[in-house]
Image: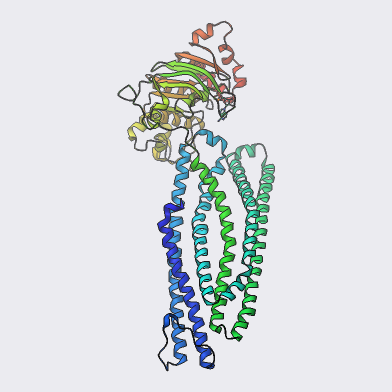
């Protein structure tokens, strides 16, 4: 990833080289000034080592030379300041302006295409972390690790070169403790990495619990669990804090240890370098330059701690980000999708042939050996206790999952050979609860089709019986949902869900118990709206509502993932020992998750 930003990284490095050279130049000018002064005071002292074979015109006053040298050093400092600003701006533009947004887009884009399986295995809090803080951790690899370590290497190399050229012996003495520095850094990095990993996992956990407790606020309050929840969150909060303190203790040990080791360098410099100056083997100016360079050298070595530190953190973040980016997309359009036989999309024949599906390897199949042959425009009702596999069966048709075995065909074409978008555009889905986004009502109905004509949106809403209450909202179809006063009842949400499902006039309708959680009257309205919509469309509907079951061309009774009975309502009711009466009687609702659906169904029975 960093490689794709090599141009910008190189530009940043170029600025750093300039900064380094200017810094060293400034130091050298200072050393030169000292030697000029010393030479002026004591003729016997070595002559100032003017660079590039240049020397001042004879008779130039030392004062003037010192002023000129000082001016040049000031100029170098000014240029350094300017380059530092340029560097900060260009690096920021690179990481916050390019890398972070592009990574976020990539991670989010990938999540959109990943199978539901991925989301079952990853909590939403942890996934949000991946698009926010983990992405930041990854970008810090570029500016705080990659660029910084290159800068570190370059400056260490330059300083070392300069020092060696001036005095090999002194340099070697000064750097005698460097291996110790490296060992300390390595030991430190080994210790801190697991602590960082553990800490991020704990942080994920905390975020997950917090977001759950906000989403489930009603349950928390309803069951007076505030104190338990708070105690639990506090415990997790403390865990995160303890982890961070452990890490901090390591870090705070590391820097002083490194500092101590580098101070040893300075002592050696003064002892050995001082003796060289006495013996006139080194000029005083050079000693000062050496001291300055050593200071810089130590700063860079201490920087190593920060770099190592950030490296750990960014590698952990990177692992979590690239885990998302590298997860193979299971459900994809084939490279060369097949066209459907019908000219205007699809006719809507749906066939299941020996379909078996399991959520994950080694798990009990949620569906087994399913055979269905639905003619275009027919209505297939799915009936069965909770957990029988009704939702799973519905989810296979828009390819939310692919069958583990067997084939599903639409108009005779294997779903896996069709273009995914084209397939899903021909399917209208409606779930037990319609998720509404914090958009306008119109945008919610036209979700996924923002350019839908307003007249179509309103027509769909009218069919779904939503038009009246939408017009009564403060801004009608332009009311933004989720804002104060614009909260809708369960029944109203389902009507919007129905309008959304029918807006595109899909050939296939999938209804997953859409009236499970609404009152009897609403259920009745929704079913009658559906009856109108279902005309001419292939419909798969999971329901216990007898009115709809009676209308269905075929009822499939599911039990533990298998079709145990099939036939029309009349056939199934007449069958001796059949399951239909039990499923529709009071016994049925023992399995049913939502008691309010019983009211809905009895409403539908009356209808
Ligand atoms: P129904 O819609 O009839 O209530 P489902 O299709 O939701 O039944 O579930 C069928 C079976 O698959 C159940 O045993 C359920 O526990 C399991 N199941 C459903 N969704 C998942 C999932 N995302 N991951 C693992 N198992 C699942």
**Percent of width and height locating residue 165:** 51, 75
Asked if residue 20 can be seen in this view, the reply is: yes
Quarter of the image holding residue 78? bottom left
Q: Is residue 433 above or below residue 584?
A: below
Residue drawn at x 32%, y 22% is: 342
Asked if residue 484 can be seen in this view, the reply is: no
Relative side of 475 to 148, left or right: left
Ligand 1's quadrant: top right
- Tell me, what colour scheme is on the image? rainbow
Residue drawn at x 52%, y 71% is: 159
For the image, the number of numbered tags is 0
Q: Residue furthest left?
A: 343
Looking at the picture, tell me which residue is in the foreground, 101 or 270: 270
Residue drawn at x 53%, y 49% is: 318
**Percent of width and height locating residue 196:** 62, 51
**Percent of width and height locating residue 194:** 64, 50
**Percent of width and height locating residue 24:** 49, 74
Looking at the picture, tell me which residue is in the foreground, 199 or 326: 326
Relative side of 202 to 149, left or right: right
Q: Is residue 12 above or below residue 206?
A: below
Q: Is residue 397 above or below residue 123?
A: above
Relative side of 325 to 186, left or right: left
Q: Is residue 602 above or below residue 298?
A: above
């Amino acid at each position: 990833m960093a490689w794709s930003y090599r141009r910008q990284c190189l530009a940043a490095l170029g600025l750093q080289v300039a900064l380094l050279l200017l810094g060293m130049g400034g130091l050298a000018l200072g050393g030169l000034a000292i030697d000029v002064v010393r030479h002026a005071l004591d003729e016997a002292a070595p002559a100032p080592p003017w660079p590039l074979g240049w020397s001042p015109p004879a008779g130039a006053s030392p004062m003037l030379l010192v002023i000129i040298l000082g001016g040049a050093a000031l100029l170098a400092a000014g240029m350094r300041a300017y380059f530092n600003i340029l560097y900060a701006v260009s690096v920021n533009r690179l990481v916050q302006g390019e890398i972070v947004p592009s990574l976020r887009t990539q991670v989010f884009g990938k999540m959109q295409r990943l199978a539901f399986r991925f989301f079952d295995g990853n909590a939403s809090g942890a996934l949000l972390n991946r698009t926010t803080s983990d992405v930041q951790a990854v970008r810090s690899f570029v500016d705080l690790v990659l660029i910084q370590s290159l800068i570190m290497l370059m400056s260490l190399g330059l300083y070392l070169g300069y020092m060696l050229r001036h005095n090999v012996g002194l340099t070697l003495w000064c750097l005698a403790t460097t291996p110790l520095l490296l060992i300390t850094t390595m030991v430190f990095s080994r210790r801190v990495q697991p602590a960082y990993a553990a800490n991020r996992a704990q942080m994920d956990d905390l975020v997950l619990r917090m977001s759950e407790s906000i989403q489930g606020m009603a349950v928390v309050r309803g069951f007076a669990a505030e104190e338990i929840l708070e105690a639990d969150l506090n415990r997790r909060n403390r865990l995160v804090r303890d982890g961070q303190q452990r890490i901090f203790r390591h870090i705070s040990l590391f820097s002083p240890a490194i500092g101590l080791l580098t101070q040893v360098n300075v002592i050696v410099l003064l002892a050995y370098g001082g003796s060289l100056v006495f013996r006139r083997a080194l000029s005083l100016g050079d000693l000062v330059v050496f001291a300055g360079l050593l200071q810089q050298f130590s700063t860079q070595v201490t920087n190593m701690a920060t770099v190592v530190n950030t490296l750990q953190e960014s590698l952990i973040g990177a692992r979590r980000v690239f885990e998302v980016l590298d997860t193979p997309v299971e459900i994809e359009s084939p490279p060369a999708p097949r066209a459907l036989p019908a000219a205007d999309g699809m006719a809507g024949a749906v066939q299941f042939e020996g379909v078996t599906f399991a959520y994950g390897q080694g798990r009990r199949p949620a569906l087994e050996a399913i055979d269905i042959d639905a003619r275009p425009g027919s209505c297939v009702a799915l009936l069965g206790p909770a957990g029988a596999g009704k939702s799973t069966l519905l989810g296979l048709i828009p390819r939310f999952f692919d069958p583990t075995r067997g084939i599903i065909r639409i108009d005779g074409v294997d779903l896996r050979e069709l273009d995914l978008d084209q397939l899903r555009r021909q399917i209208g889905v409606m779930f037990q609860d319609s998720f509404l986004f914090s958009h306008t009502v119109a945008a919610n109905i036209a979700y996924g089709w923002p350019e839908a004509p307003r007249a179509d949106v309103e027509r769909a809403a009218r069919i779904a019986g939503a038009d009246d209450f939408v017009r009564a909202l403060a801004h009608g179809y332009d009311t933004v949902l989720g804002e104060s006063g614009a909260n809708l009842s369960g029944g109203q949400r389902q009507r919007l869900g129905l309008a959304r499902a029918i807006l595109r006039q899909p050939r296939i309708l999938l209804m997953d118990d859409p009236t499970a959680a609404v009152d009897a009257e609403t259920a009745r309205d929704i079913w009658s709206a559906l009856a109108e919509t279902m005309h001419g469309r292939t419909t798969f509907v999971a329901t216990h509502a007898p009115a709809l079951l009676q209308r269905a061309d075929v009822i499939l009774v599911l039990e533990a993932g298998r079709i145990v009975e099939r036939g029309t309502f009349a056939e199934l009711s007449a069958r001796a020992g059949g399951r239909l009466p039990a499923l529709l009687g009071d016994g049925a609702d023992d399995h049913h998750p939502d008691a309010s659906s019983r009211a809905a169904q009895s409403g539908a029975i009356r209808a």
